[in-house]
Image (tube, rainbow, N blue to C red):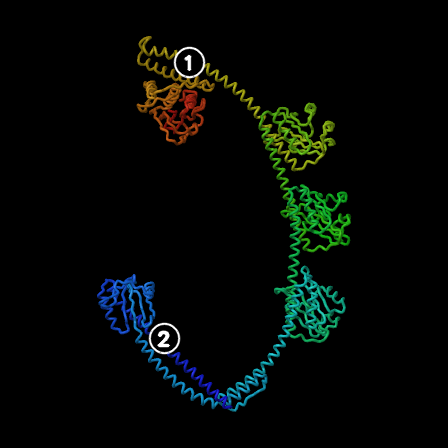
Amino acid sequence: MKPSIRLKLISFTICIVLLVGGSISFYSISQGRHRILAHFEDEARVISTLISTSLVDGLYSLDIRSMREHLEISHANRDISYTYVTDRQGVVLTDGTDENPRRDQKLSDAFSVFMLASHGWVSTWDKEILKVGGPILLPGGEHLGYLQVGFSLKSPREVIRVTTRTSLYITVICLVIGSLLAFFLSTSFSRPIWSIAQASRRIGEGKLDTRLPTDRRDELGFLAESVNLMAGALQAREAEAIRARETLKAQYQDLQLLHEISQIVLSSHDFKTVLQDILHKVLVAGSHDLGLIRLADLNTGMLVPVASKGYRDPENVKRHRKETRPGRLRTEAMVSKQPAIVENVPEYQGLSTLKREGVHSAILVPVQAQQKVLGVIQFGSRTPRVFQPHEVSLLEAVGNQMGLVIQKARLFEEVQRQSQKIQALYSVTSTVSHSLDANTIAQAALRATVEALKLDAGCLYIVDQEKTLLRVQARYGIQLDALSGHEVCAPGEGIIGRVFKDGGAVVFSDVANDSQYGSMAGSGMAWDLGFRSAAALPITTKDQVFGVMYLCGREVREFTSHDIELFLAIGVQVGVAIENARLFGETQKNLKRVQVLREIDQAIASSLDLRAVLDIFLEKVTLTLPYSSAATILLVDPGRGELDRIACRNLDEAEWKQRGMVQPRHPLAVLEVTRPLVIRNVQTDPSTADPDFFRRHGLVSLVVLPLVNKDEVVGVLSVYSKEEREFGKEEVEFLNTLAARAAVAIHNARLYEELRASRDESEKANKAKDEFLGFVSHELKTPVHAILGYVGMIEDGIVGEINQEQQQVLRKIIWHAKDLSILINGLLEATRVRSGEVRLELSAVPLGQFLDELRSAYDFPMEKPVSLNWDYPSELPVVSTDSDKLKHILQNLISNAIKFTEKGSVTISARIKEANGGEKNNTHPGSRLPSTEARRCVEFRVNDTGIGIPKESFSYIFEMFGQADGPSRSGRSGGVGLGLYIVDKFTELLGGEVEVQSELGKGSTFTVTIPA
């Protein structure tokens, strides 16, 4: 080795040793200083904590002396410079000295403020002092104050100086030893290392065959072997890198091919052009001679050639099209989803088309996307060839990429189809949504459909209500005279009828060459009108076919399954629109009919005169019908059973009634079968009795309807039109509804006439009865009063003395005579009430005096064990009322109570009821008056312990001649049922109300309430 290099090596080694030694020494001194200071700080915190613990009791009791003693003890530690004990606000309590110069002073330096803001022990270095401070806490955690201790750094500084001096000594020793060692090593290892360095330089220059001698058995020998191994490894790595570069180049070419394929896909929207360009690129890149792409048809599943390249004979491609079954090799590739390789085609069984093309080696790659095989790509070489794995992988990648292309293209086509479908549906829907008229919608829908499907003409057929015929409702692009013979068709006949019956769309791409068209159409409207293509689609709603749209084109057109789907969808949309329009029309028509019915009901309800009702009805009917008409009504005579001409409209009534000598045939027929009769032309119908009459008045069509009420035919309604028309089922039903209304009106009018006649007779009878009762009552009243007068004279002894037995007989005569007088008075009063002759005579009535006088009238012994009890306060107010009618009310109630009580008591009571602002509810059985607003009133009660009244009699005991039923009451009445009638009427006149409560066997209570 050269001396200069050796000297440099020695110098370099010594520098390294010095650098390392100095670094170690500096690090040791620095770390030692930090550890000493950190240890000192930890000890200071521990000492401060112990001091604070000893100060707890003194601070808690504010014993300054005790705290000073503890602090003086702590000052025995020579490292402690000062101590402060403060309260919680930082005010100094003691510093451990007797002088305590800072007592009651608040610590305000930065550390003290930091200590007061902290919740634990803190410390800081301040020049030559370590300040430690923290809280003094009770065992329970209660905060008493703070302790601040200052520690001198003299002790740790001394320790640091000793440690530094020791480290420097050790460093010097290490440097001396290192220098000696460096000199020795530089001499022993410099030459071998130089050789290794030279070899490394040559290897670095690319001379990878460089090798070193390996005769040494020490570390340098091992290092030489390592250099040799490294050179060999680098030599092998270089060879591998060369191979990798070649592989990378091939992969780059493959990626370049895939990129070019992607660019082809992005640059064109023509599906077949894209496949053709991709096939060309792959053939060039892979050095193949020919290629063929075959895709599975979505409907049949057959493999159809879509792109080819390199075929010498185009007929071979056509042969591929004619194949009905896939070959064994294609089946293998599609089933396994793996490439199928044939390196020797001439010896392979099959592949006849490739053999004719002179192909020697071939590979079939499946075209797939998302694990679904869409077809195969076939590549062939006319020279022998072995397909390498990377070539197969590339072709697989091409197949997968092509699968994505095909899938996206199909999705794009599907989106376009759906877009066109939606656009067509929208065009049809938006067109038909502008109207609610069925004819307008049909015409608009047909036109929109023809234009949306890019055809030329069409007709729209709608089935009638009976579903027997399909009629043209709209046409477009076809003249009316051209439809002669095709306006109507029956379900099941011809193309229109079959589509209506089957419910499926039918298409003909070329009517001239389609045998099915001839068999289905017969003569064929499309062919007759010069069209080449045709389609018939059903018009449906709610899964029901109600029409057919027949569309025609002047050019031959291939209709796909997507077209048929679109046809059916349009049929549904058009069906919904027409059905909605039809429903709207029916709704409008029904609303008008309901309005007509309401007007007719109101009109015929405005009168109960039969002729007036019929005239109004016929006028409304003829005005309602949308055509010129006339109408007649014939009614059945209940006695004769014949039809009488009663009313007519828009006819000469006199002439019409003159025909009454002969019974009309048509109404009689309806009367017999009880259902409507429709005649299309009454002038020519052989059943018409007098056709000249109808000709004179211009009446053509006729519908005759029975007038039925509660299963009874009361007459016949005839409606005539002045033009020939066919009355539909719906129209006949509406007229039948009108006839039913007329029948009810006729029935009501007849009932009213019968009721009016009956009422007149009843009024006459009631008047005669009232006159008779008034006469009889008046004539009986005089002799009864005479009897009472003479009997009274006999009882008083005016005509002579009488014995006890005679006295008792006279009392009975007087009693019954008074009953008879009461009965006569009741008859007179009832007659006056019914005739309206009763009038109120109001006066001021002192109730107390009134009841005293009434009580005196019953101050005589009874013939049966019945006692009369009177219960009323001594002070009662003066009320404004009719005293005679009030007296009559109470006398009738008391008499009835005595009459129907064999044994017991009758209690008469009176009281004043104060108003309470509420409402009085008549909850007692038998109350016949509605609730009245509560007010100040007088309440009279007559309570007995007699036989009682059945509850079922409550509803009529207050009626005239009304008497309670029951065997216990029969034979006891002694009256005609006028008493309670008069009570009720008089109470009503007084502005009051009467109630009854009763229970059989326990008695009754009658309550009369009148205003006070």
State left or right for residue 111 relative to residue 192: left
Looking at the image, residue 307 lies above or below residue 444: below
Q: Residues within 10 Å of mark 2 (few under 14, many from 20)?
A: few
Query: Alpha carbon of mark 2 to alpha carbon of mark 1: how far?
Result: 148 Å
**Residue highlighted by disc 2:** 34
Considering every residue shown, the one lying at the far bottom of the view is 215
Q: Amino acid at mark 1?
A: Lys
Q: Quadrant of residue 325?
A: bottom right
On the rendered image, what quadrant is the C terminus found in? Answer: top left
At a point 45% along the width and 83% down the height, the residue shown is 16
Q: Nearer the viewer, residue 80 or 686?
A: 80
Q: Which residue is mark 1?
A: 781
Residue 447: tell me if it is visible.
Answer: yes
Can residue 970 be seen in the rendering of this structure? no
Up the image or down, 470 lies above or below 882; here it is: below
The amino acid pointed to by label 2 is His
The first of marks 2 and 1 along the sequence is: 2
Q: Nearer the viewer, residue 111 or 942?
A: 111
Question: In x, y percent, where is residue 492?
Answer: 71, 47
Is 276 or 602 nearer to us in this picture?
276
Q: Residues within 10 Å of mark 1 (few under 14, many from 20)?
A: some
Across and down, in percent, residue 652 comes to 69, 25
